[in-house]
Structure formats: structure tokens, C-alpha cells
Image: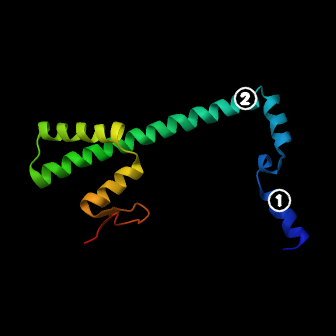
Amino acid sequence: MNRQDRRKAQKAKPAWQRMTPEQRAAAWSKNGITTQDLLEEYNKGYTDGRKDGIDQVGQTIYAAFCLALKDMHGFGKKRCEDLLRAVDEKVMYTLTSKEAIEQVWDEMKLRLNFAEPFDHIEKVE
């Protein structure tokens, strides 16, 4: 890439990407935005997004438990509720994620591997 190509590539970027951090801060402050405002909004967005994501995934997993147990073993409302309360107790009071994974391996010989994209559960005999 020669000088002309590098200059063309630099000019193709949006103006805010070509600015130094100091230039960006000066542009924000011109509009009444401080670095503290940006940091607060970032933290709020991160916290809200993380909470929404965790809540959504948790609800989906709990619903999947109930549906799978209903289909496989005929669980009804009471047994599903009992199971979910037991799961809550394990998650909240008993185990860290590493301990839970190790306990499943030790007691059931099931390896839980979420790095594997398609088959998260490996049965080892």
C-alpha cells in the first residue's frame, strides 16, 4: 500500500474515527457532554444489557427444563415447580459453576462443554 492508498483509506473513515481522544473529548464538550456523562451512560447500558440478557437466558432455560420434563416424564405443574426451586437452591446457595460442572462429571459422568458449538453434553463411559 503506497502513501496515496493510505491517505485514501484514512479519509474513508468517519471523522470521529480520525480524531484523537483529546479531539473527541473537545467535540463532546462543545455539545455539553462530559467524559463522566459518557462513562455513566456506558455503565448503565452495560448493566441493563447484562441484566436483560441474563434474565432472558434464565427464563428460557427454566422454560426448556419444564417442557422437556413434561414431554419426557409427564411432569406437571407441582413437580416442575419443585424441580425449579431445587435448581434455584443449587444455583444460589450450593455451587459455583466450576463445582457444579465437576459434580455432574463425578456423579453422572457427563461432560458439559459449551465451547463445543453443537453438542454441549458428552457422555463418557
- Mark 2 or 1: in front is 2
Residue at the extreme front of the image, as rendered: 106
Q: Nearer the viewer, residue 61 or 6?
A: 61
Assign the N terminus to one quadrant of the image: bottom right
The image quarter in which residue 6 lies: bottom right
Q: Nearer the viewer, residue 107 or 101?
A: 107
Q: Tag 1's secondary structure? A: helix
| Vertical relation: 14 (above or below) 58 | below
Residue at the extreme left of the image, as rendered: 74
Assign the C terminus to one quadrant of the image: bottom left
Q: Residue at x 63, y 36 (%)?
A: 42
Q: Which residue is mark 2?
A: 36
Q: Residue at x 57, y 35 (%)?
A: 45
Q: Residue at x 13, y 55 (%)?
A: 72
Q: Nearer the viewer, residue 99 or 11?
A: 99
The image quarter in which residue 26 lies: top right
Residue at the extreme top of the image, as rendered: 32
Q: Are marks 2 and 1 in contact (CB under 8 Å)?
A: no
Q: Which residue is mark 1?
A: 10
Mark 2 residue type: Gln
Q: Residues within 10 Å of mark 1 (few under 14, many from 20)?
A: few
Would you say 60 lies left or right of 17 here? left
The x, y position of residue 114, in whole percent, is 40, 60
Q: Residue at x 82, y 51 (%)?
A: 18
Q: Tag 2's secondary structure? A: helix
The x, y position of residue 22, in whole percent, is 85, 40
Would you say 18 lies left or right of 123 here? right
